[in-house]
């Protein structure tokens, strides 16, 4: 059963790295959208002004949501790290065995190329 916990920690780490990448890309997209919106500031017209204000409101809401997701992601990453740390302290030889097995697998894959 403990071996499954170790695998779960590795899977969670991979998914959190993917989530961090997605958050980073989303932040970049929001910055680009904000720059595009601000570039229209010198264009007069009520319609453009209304669309610009709505877009800025949407971006502000998205930033708030993203901040909450980012906080949750950090909390989950800390929990996963604490779980992995507890596993290693409770089962040091199993952790060494898992690490050695992963090293062997990686070595076999590299050796085949």
Image (spheres, rainbow, N blue to C red):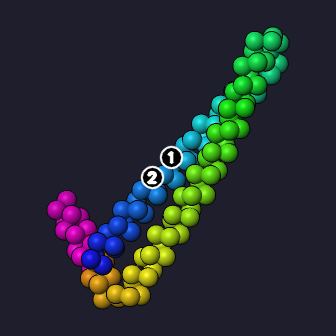
Residue 76 on image: x %, y %? 51, 63
Q: Tally the marks.
A: 2
| Residue range corresponding to the magenta coloring | 100-113
C-alpha separation, residue under disc 2 versus residue under disc 1: 6 Å
In this rendering, the answer to whether 9 lies above or below 40 is: below
- The residue singled out by tag 2 in the image is 18
Residue 86 on image: x %, y %? 44, 82
Q: Which mark is residue 22?
A: 1
Q: Residue at x 55, y 47 (%)?
A: 23
Residue 93 on image: x %, y %? 30, 89
Discs 2, 1 touching: Cβ within 8 Å: yes
Q: Is residue 31 visible?
A: no
**Left or right of 18, for residue 37:** right
Please, which residue is most extreme toward the front here? Answer: 1
Q: Which mark is residue 88?
A: none
**Left or right of 35, for residue 81:** left
Does 107 appear in magenta? yes
Q: Residue at x 81, y 10 (%)?
A: 45
Q: Residue at x 51, y 65 (%)?
A: 77
Residue 83 on image: x %, y %? 44, 75
Name the secondary structure under disc 2.
helix
**Mark 1 packing: few (<14 Cα in 10 Å), some, or many (20+)?**
few
Q: Residue at x 80, y 22 (%)?
A: 41
């Amino acid at each position: 059963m403990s071996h499954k916990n170790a695998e779960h920690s590795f899977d969670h780490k991979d998914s959190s790295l993917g989530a961090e990448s997605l958050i980073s890309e989303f932040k970049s997209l929001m910055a680009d959208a904000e720059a595009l919106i601000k570039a229209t500031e010198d264009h007069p017209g009520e319609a453009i002004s209304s669309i610009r204000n709505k877009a800025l409101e949407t971006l502000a809401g998205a930033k708030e949501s993203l901040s909450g997701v980012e906080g949750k992601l950090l909390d989950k990453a800390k929990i996963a790290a604490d779980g992995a740390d507890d596993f290693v302290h409770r089962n040091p030889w199993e952790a060494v065995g898992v690490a050695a097995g992963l090293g062997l697998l990686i070595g076999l894959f590299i050796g085949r190329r």
